[in-house]
Image (cartoon, rainbow, N blue to C red):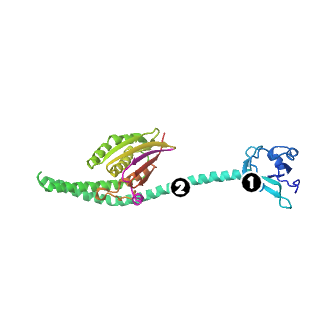
Amino acid sequence: MIALRDIESPERGVLLLDKDHRVLHANTRAAAIFGVPLSELVGSELPRAVTHRAMAREEVVEEVIDSWNEPGAVFHRYSAPIYSADGEVAGRVEIYSDITARRVLEREILDRNRELADLNAQLEEAQEQLVHSERLRTLGEMAAGVAHDINNVIGIILGNVQLARRKLGEDNPAKRSLDSIELAARDAAETVRRLREISKPLDGAGHVAVNLNDIVNDLVRGALPAWKESRLRDGAHIEVQTEFSDGCRVKGNAAELREALANVLINAAQAIEGSGRIVITTFREDDFARITVKDNGVGMSPETLDRIFDPFFTTRGAQGTGLGMSMVDAIAIRHRGKVTVESEEGIGTVVTLRFPACG
């Protein structure tokens, strides 16, 4: 059997064992790894610190183990049988390789990969917001270019409607047509206004601390009962549930935040057919405060979900302007936040508004 007296290595400890796991030969590094003198190691059984023993003589063992004697050190253990000239197992050779530096490097690489993944996610989010902002800027330029002319035309229409009313008696059937004309003109003016609102630039100069719980309460107590009553006339019964958390304060414009949440709640109410529920939740997560609106309405198809933030895209035909969620998206961006939507047909929709928290 080969003697290992001349096998020395600063990194690898080598043991030669007989068939009963007794140490026949060892190098000085092996003695240092096990924390015993070389003279004491040779002739003894394989140290009890090595808990995994080969179950079969032909078994090859490979494992990573922590040092028993050197705090923080890590070793790779390789144990394989040694055969005699006639092919019988004569013993085993065990090699303990110091892989501490490699493990430290692996951990550093994993930590760096996680940091890069986080940075990449932040970059993707920033790019997404930049795309949104650019799209809204383009839309704003278009709106600004035509808003003045459209408002002039709308002003002429409304002025002539008022003049025509004065000339007609109260019972004249034409007054109903004038009412329809006036309503359509005012709706057009509101559409132009909302277009210009969507394209407002990011400006936090006038932002103050706002409690998202107050924003929710304002709408639940003020506007939501009217929406529920309107849907009740359509045969829908809606239950509203709120769940509030502390610490949900953000820097923002309360009126804009109410408008964003109002658009989300209107969509939720209109999505419910028959009986349904809307759950409004606020919660704080790390450096962000969130409002989540969950409904069990009809939900959306993947195709609709892909276009939900596109200006003028609507599934309600003439009843919708297609600017509601565009407005929500724009307000979120102006507050350095983000809006996400998850939906499944027949199950419902979850809309989350996320903003940087303050305080």
Circle nearer the viewer, 2 or 1: 1
- The residue shown at (46%, 47%) is 355
SS label for mark 1: strand
Amino acid type of disc 2?
A: Leu
- Identify which residue is drawn at 73% across, 54% down: 62
On-image quarter of the N terminus: bottom right
The stretch of residues the image draws in magenta is 287-307
The spot of residue 158 in percent (x, y) is 22, 55
Say the numbered circle drawn on residue 32.
none
Q: Is residue 22 above or below residue 153?
A: above
Q: Badge 2: few (under 14), some or many (20 or more) residues near its Cα, within 10 Å?
A: few
- Is residue 203 visible to us here? no
| Label 1 sits on residue | 61
Q: Quadrant of residue 91?
A: bottom right
Marking on residue 123: 2
Can you give x and y, in whole percent of width and height, for residue 185 in the image? 25, 56
Kindly identify the amino acid type of the residue bearing the numbered disc 1: Val
Q: Residues within 10 Å of mark 1 (few under 14, many from 20)?
A: some
